[in-house]
Amino acid sequence: MVASSVRDILQQNRKPGRDAETVEILRTHFDAVLVHGDPAFIRLEDSFPLASEIADQVIYTGLVAPDPPQPVTEGWDIIVSAGGGAVGGALIRAAALARKRLSPDLRWCLIAGPNLPAPEYDAIAADLV
């Protein structure tokens, strides 16, 4: 078996007669046309006007793509960010207090920001342990 492989959405051809030439080549030299797409989404005839002339050769493969990424198993349940941190101390302190009152199973990420004054950061950090 000799097969051609094409995308599901073809570019419009600007050369007159090119579609007919393509059909002739496919009919003469190929047994099948593998269309990488889902006909429920878009069909070959939506972008190739002479698709009906090769309909008996068309085989839809579905979408060809890598496997989807694995779901993230690690992450945060609650993220609190104080932006740059210059005036974020009260927010971070409130979040630290809330952390103590909520479920210990929740995973927290407190982002103080680079401009939170060091003594304030140290006091909050000491209170978290």
Image (spheres, helix red, strand yellow):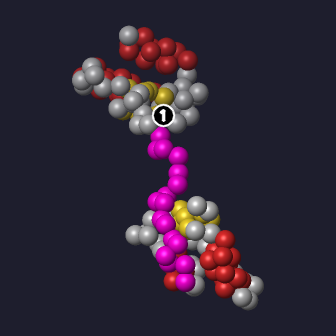
Question: Residue 39's spot in the image, x, y percent?
Answer: 44, 70
Q: Is residue 47 magenta?
A: no
For residue 102, side relative to residue 46 (left or right)? left
User: Residues in magenta?
Assistant: 53-69
| Residue found at x 54% / y 26% | 116
Query: In this figure, which residue is indicated by the disc labeled 1?
Result: 82
| Residue found at x 48% / y 44% | 67
Task: Tell me if I can see residue 12 in this picture.
Answer: no
Determine the image quadrant of residue 94: top left
Residue furthest bottom as drawn: 16
Q: Is residue 43 above or below residue 36?
A: below
| Residue found at x 38% / y 26% | 108
Q: Is residue 67 magenta?
A: yes
Task: Tell me if I can see residue 81 in this picture.
Answer: yes
Q: Residues within 10 Å of mark 1 (few under 14, many from 20)?
A: some
Quarter of the image for the C terminus: give it: top left
Quarter of the image for the N terminus: give it: bottom right
Q: Is residue 22 above or below residue 77?
A: below
Q: Nearer the viewer, residue 129 or 57?
A: 57
